[in-house]
Image: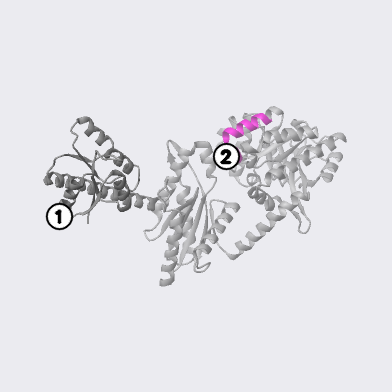
Amino acid sequence: MTTILVIEDVEALREEIMETLSYEGFDVLGAENGVVGVQMAKTYVPNLIICDIAMPELDGYGTLTALRQESKTSMIPFIFLTAMTEKTDMRQAMQLGADDYLTKPFTSADLLGAIASRLQKYNSVREHYYDEIKAAGARFEYLSHHDGLTQLPNRILFYESLAQAILHAKINHKSLAVLFLDMDNFNIINNTLGTDIGDQLFKAIAERLRRYTAPCDMVARIQGDEFAMIISDIADQNSIKQETQKILDLLSRPYNLYGHEVFITSSIGITLFPEDHQEVEGLIKNAELAMYYAKNHSRNSYKLYSPDLNVQSSEYMALANSLHRAMDRSEFRVFYQPLIDLTSGKIVGAEALARWQHPDLGIIMPNKFIPVAEQTGLILRLTEVVLYSVCEQMRSWREDGLNYGYMAVNLSGQHFRPENNLIETIGKILQETGTNPEHLELELTESIIMQNAELTIQVLSHLQAMGVKIAIDDFGTGYSSLSYLKHFPVNTLKIDHCFIQDITTDRHDATISLAIIELAHSLSLQVVAEGVETAEQIQLLRQYGCDRIQGYFFSPPLPAAEFEKMLIEGKCL
């Protein structure tokens, strides 16, 4: 029933209005003044209010003002009753928020007509308001379950859908696969081409995955550059491997974005229901673990979950914990692999390589602990330890009158973040050890260079101005567009061993190596061939004009004392 509140200080008129409205079927309340009327409106929240203007204690204007300030009464239709006929009075009433006014005297028809008009408008507005609330609720429900950029289901909806898919598979005795996908080196796209293109690439990736996914399956964006898929009714492992390879191939095709041809690869982890696990959390954990394994070991590849990964994960945690203690216990040693000049055959320097002298496991190689150091953030501290050790060793050799040439030390991409103050760290170490900056070479990979190109140029330019040499390590395995070389302050290119190992038998590797050497020389850069293991390789590299070599043919990495002995003896190629 519609409730109407009548606020009128003249009792006879109030009773007359209330009687008329009651006769028309309204539920009617009465108040003798504005103070009582405001309180009754707050208590009963009527559907409409009829109010006199001239009243003692609180007039109609004050009553309306008080009601409009309260959230639950602010929208109630309000009709003024007034004997005032001046336009200024009526304008004031409307400015305060009145919906209508009746001038005394008025007829029952006038009153009922005004009420009907106001209630009809109010109901229309209320229905529209409720429709908007319903639409907003639906929109909120959608946004809470979908990614705003790609419109794919998000993590929440993926978890819910996976639970339903598992239930369906259990009932129907079917298998399903959960895939976790991570885009390799996506941050390089953002840093080099900008976040706008990065966002467009996300949309393009999402669209490819959406079109590939069957209607009964699902693809979701979990976070950042991580996506996930549910593939139902899997026949066997081979079928899901074939499907996953198709996805890798699909994502690796070029993307044309704002005139840029962009390439991206991905790493995918796979787990199967019911073989690997039968619950949502377990399957997701398995798929993530397999994905991280693929990402850390090869990239642009997939890994099928196996219980061995849990063991490896436990080993990783144990290694990470031991790594912290190893730093405090000074368990790291520096080995030196000679760098040989191909013209003179003499040692002209060495690459400094960290080894972990574990008290129980013996020597642990860098390929075991460097990835852990990178992921735990200990790589910064480890590199600083190595740099101090190398510079102190150079001071010792210098004091003994040994010509060691220069020492090359590898850097991590984490050093090229604004907060890590690489320039200050290098400067401090050189000053404290009295090392000539020209005796130090810093090595970094192509991928590190491209992570934050603008900052990297600034840092390397400053270091080179100090006299420190800069080398690109593992050259040819990263972007290899070569165009960045003219922008970056670089002294040396190191050809990756993967091109050197078959250089005498594979004409493609030979051609690539020769091209790198000729390009480097055209840019006045030195070239070092890594991983040289045979005399035939050396002969061909000499023929190509390579400047220096490094590898087991001449010497493996050696402890400082053995490298020192080699220097004293003047060992040559």
Residue 351: x and y, percent?
Answer: 74, 41
Q: Which of the two residues, 114 or 510, is positioned nearer the viewer here?
A: 114
Residue 62: x and y, percent?
Answer: 31, 39
Residue 358 numbered mark, or none: none
Residue type at numbered disc 1: Tyr
Nearest to N terminus: mark 2 or mark 1: 1
Q: Is residue 493 visible?
A: no
Residue 404: x and y, percent?
Answer: 80, 36
Q: Quadrant of the C terminus?
A: top right
In the depicted structure, whether residue 16 falls above or below residue 491: below
Tell me the SS state at disc 1.
helix
Residue 451 numbered mark, or none: 2
Categorize mark 2 by other alpha carbons within 10 Å: few (<14), some (14-19), many (20+): many
**Magenta stretch contains residue 519:** no
Q: CA distance from mark 2 to mark 1?
A: 80 Å
Kindly identify the residue that appears in the image at 46 percent across and 59 percent down: 159
Residue 339: x and y, percent?
Answer: 75, 39
Q: Quadrant of the N terminus?
A: bottom left
Q: Is residue 368 visible?
A: yes
Residue type at numbered disc 2: Gln
Q: Which residues are magenta?
A: 448-463
Tell me the SS state at disc 2.
helix
Categorize mark 1 by other alpha carbons within 10 Å: few (<14), some (14-19), many (20+): few
In the depicted structure, whether residue 487 falls above or below residue 8: above
Q: Which of the two residues, 410 or 427, is positioned nearer the viewer here?
A: 427
Look at mark 1 in the image and give the residue it sits on.
23
Judging from the image, the colouring scheme is one colour
* Farthest right residue in view: 400
Q: What type of secondary structure mainly makes up the magenta span?
A: helix
Which mark's residue is nearer the viewer, 2 or 1? 1
Q: Which of the two residues, 279 or 491, is positioned nearer the viewer here?
A: 279
